[in-house]
Structures are given as C-alpha cells and as structure tokens.
Amino acid sequence: MTTRISFYNKDLLAEAGIEEPPLTYEDLVTVAKQVKVKTGKYAFFMTFVPGDSNEVLESFVQMGVTLVAEDGSAGFDSPEGRAAFQYWVDLYEQELLPPEVLTQGHQHGIELYQAGETAIINTSPEFINSIQQNAPQIAAVSVPSSQITGVTGKKNVAVMNLVIPKDTDDLETALDFALFVTNTENQLAFAQAANVLPSTVEAVDQYIALLEQDAGTDSLTLARQVSAQQLGDAEILIPAQENLTQLQKFIYENLQAAMLGQKSVDEAVTDAAEAWNSL
C-alpha cells in the first residue's frame, strides 16, 4: 500500500506569513490567498485535464460527495456535489490556481514545485529523492506534511493486490503463497525493501516504530513516517468501477466549462450527471 502526502516549501510559506501548512481544503483557500498576495505565486497545482490524475475526483469524496449512487446513477448530482464544483470554480475565478490546470497534467505540477513557483505538492514520500536530484535548493526547504483532506477526514490509499485466478491448476499452493507474502513478517520486510507500506496492522505498527528510531532530520524517513501514520484515516477513495474514465471525463469537462464561465455550476453538474446517467 501507499498513501499520498504533501510536501511544502517552508520558505515560500514563511514569506507569505504562514506558519503551518494547510491540512484541509478549507485551510487551503486561506493559504492560497496569502501566498498569492504576499509572493505573487500559487499555493498549489491540481490538474483538471481528463485522462490525467484522479486527484480532483478524490477531493470530491473527501468533501463528502458520493460520486456514484448505489443504483449506478450520478451520486454527485447533490448539494455536496454542487459545493465541490463551486469550491474549485471559486479558486479558479479568484486566480488562486495556475491557468495551466485546465491544459496541463500532473507532471506540470511537479515542474512548478521544483521551480519554486508553487508552495505545496501532493505526491509520494519517495518524491523527495527526485527533488534532491532535480532541484536540490527546493529539496532543502521541502518539509513533509499529511495529505490535505476535506470534512470527512478521509485520505487516499493505493492498494496492490494478489489475485488467484479461478481456473488455477494449484489453488492450495497459490493460496499458501498469497498468505506467505501478506503475513506480518513478510509484509514488514517487503515494505522496507520496496519503499511501500505494509498491509497488516501489526506490520504497520512495527514499521512506524522502526521509522521513529531512524527519524532524525532525514526528509525521506520523515515523509515515510507521515505516510504510514495516516493509514488509520486512509481508504480507497475511488474503487475500481466500470466506465471510471468516462465519469472523470464528464465531471472534468463540465467543471472546466464552469471554471471558464461557459456554464453555471448548476448547469455543469446537471450536464455531467445527464451524461453519466445516459450510460
């Protein structure tokens, strides 16, 4: 398993008069305004390009939106869904998001952060290694923080699975192997070797204890600590489902139209819902 964390540029936040990084989307609005006013730069970048990152969809879930109802219809056609649309529209209209969020993908957000043009980036703990290579001066002022979330307190986790095909010739051996790989001892060893998080409660506790012993001032160790400690609030925010790419496309395209003033928020939500329900 892995959980996303935030890195923030402590110098840029300090220049904006901010002592602590934002932990919620509500906090993020305040920080974004101060960073823009005090430094002329942006607090963060998040892509709204269909086919790229699902981070905006995940933000909806964190804000309390049900993307797909139990009957398969558009669950986001709700007061919570409209509020989430409005949140991102307001940020864009107030010029608190880089204009490229409508045309550039997640990679552009990485480039902006490494160039010192944004104060916060959502990524994995291992990203610090990349910053150290590509922008050592930014790495030196980058501090790990927990993932930004909404009113639900939910945080994203990505989970890898071992699957046994129904028609396997050797079910018992396959099951034994799956249980061997996923037991506490081997999950702990695997997490240390592969720089991921283990998947049993006992292994997570042991992993955190080992990280705390090594903490010091090492940025990567601190980042892994943050990542592991937020597992208690983490879940798969967007479970695998049929037509997920279409769901993202309908929401992102209509959200873009609202951000550009081509549609009202109500029209954007309604149009996205009708497109999804037509499937």
Image (spheres, rainbow, N blue to C red):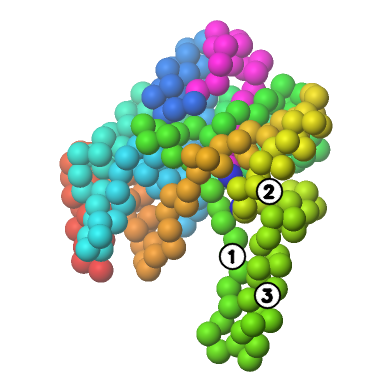
Please give the residue where the numbered disc 2 appears in the rendered image: 203
SS at badge 1 = loop
Please give the residue where the numbered disc 1 appears in the rendered image: 161
Q: Residues within 10 Å of mark 2 (few under 14, many from 20)?
A: many
Q: Is residue 264 above or below residue 76?
A: above
Q: Please state which of residues 9 and 103 is positioned toward the viewer in this rendering.
A: 9
Residue 277 image position (x, y, % from top left):
21, 62
Q: Please state which of residues 36 and 231 is positioned toward the viewer in this rendering.
A: 231
Image check: 265 left or right of 16?
Answer: left
Image check: 207 left or right of 26?
Answer: right
Between discs 2 and 3, the one toward the N terminus? 3
Q: Does the magenta segment cover residue 271?
A: no
Between discs 3 and 1, the one toward the N terminus? 1
SS at badge 2 = helix
Q: Which amino acid, mark 2?
A: Ala
Q: Please state which of residues 122 and 163 is positioned toward the viewer in this rendering.
A: 163
- Visible residue check, residue 135: no
User: Image point 62% across, 38% down: which residue?
Assistant: 227
Please give the residue where the numbered disc 3 appears in the rendered image: 176
Q: Which amino acid, mark 3?
A: Asp
Label 3, label 1: how many angstroms apart (C-alpha)?
15 Å
Residue 225 image position (x, y, % from top left):
68, 35
User: Image point 20% across, 39% down: which residue?
Assistant: 79
Residue 248 image position (x, y, % from top left):
38, 55
- Tell me the quadrant of the picture where the C terminus can be found: bottom left
- Visible residue check, residue 222: yes
Q: Which residues are magenta?
A: 4-22
Q: Which amino acid, mark 1?
A: Asn
